[in-house]
Image (cartoon, rainbow, N blue to C red):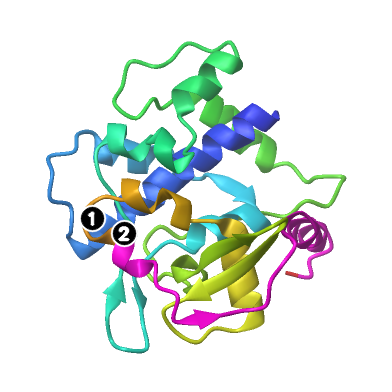
Amino acid sequence: MSLLQLQYCTVIAIWARLASVAVDVGYITANIPEISQLLKAVVGLQLPSVLAKYVKTLGIYRLAAGVEVGPWFASRDEMSNRNFHQLNPDDLLRQADRPVPDNYWSIDRNWIAEWNQATSRPSRLGMHFRPITWSVTQGLPEMVVTPLQQDEFLRPTAPQQFTDVEGQLGAVYRWRSFADLRHWPEQTALVCTRLLYGTEVYPTEFWSDIVVASFTSST
């Protein structure tokens, strides 16, 4: 395994998660090609438990006010928007000296198969890998948290009440940023509301604790 391979598989998993939710709920409005191929590519895919939970966060989440919020899904170009600091799998493949596949989602089936084979072996380091249940479309509250940058700390904000754990984890996930608000498509900026604030968190230390906990099965 390599860091680039992990990053690549995580990006494909996020795209597949968004696609599976959009297909299940029925809010795909554009003619986006090869969605079935994208969903087939992640069959059997496992990620470290901490990242599997990260991907699982995305889904349909009902706010206390009754409004349902879903993750954005669009064309390949829009899903690789550098204004949102999103990773492009083509860049990762080139860095790994692998050819970019000639398909819409840049699915490198051999590299994904190698990843699946590696994650099926017991790890001597104790890293726990988990599959993602693609048929479950429910999102988690961390998805609607937007962090405010305060020096080297992040302060979580959200449109409704949340626990400290939800707020801090959502802030560290950084699904969105107030600084990128002008780039957000259509009405998605409405999720970014500062109704409630949570306890600030130092992201590097917090994420380190989460990763260590995933090795000790305490997450």
Where does the image place residue 12, in percent across and percent down from the top left?
45, 39
Q: Amino acid at mark 1?
A: Val
Residue at 39% from the left image edge and 67% from the top image edge: 192
Residue at 52% from the left image edge and 19% from the top image edge: 93
Residue at 47% from the left image edge and 28% from the top image edge: 89
Q: Is residue 200 left or right of residue 14?
A: right
Which of the 4 quarters of the picture holds residue 74? top left
Q: Which residue is mark 1?
A: 23
Where does the image place residue 3, in percent across and percent down from the top left?
68, 31
Label 1 secondary element: helix
176, above or below 9, in the image:
below
12, above or below 26, in the image:
above
Q: Residues within 10 Å of mark 2 (few under 14, many from 20)?
A: many
Q: Which residue is mark 2?
A: 21
Where does the image place residue 110, in percent across and percent down from the top left?
51, 22
Which of the 4 quarters of the picture holds residue 34? top left
Disc 1 and disc 2 in contact, CB within 8 angstroms: yes
Q: Is residue 53 left or right of residue 103?
A: right
Label 2 secondary element: helix
195 or 48, nearer to the observer: 195
**Magenta residues, as a range?**
189-218
151 or 44, nearer to the observer: 151
Task: Decide if residue 132 is in sight here.
Answer: no
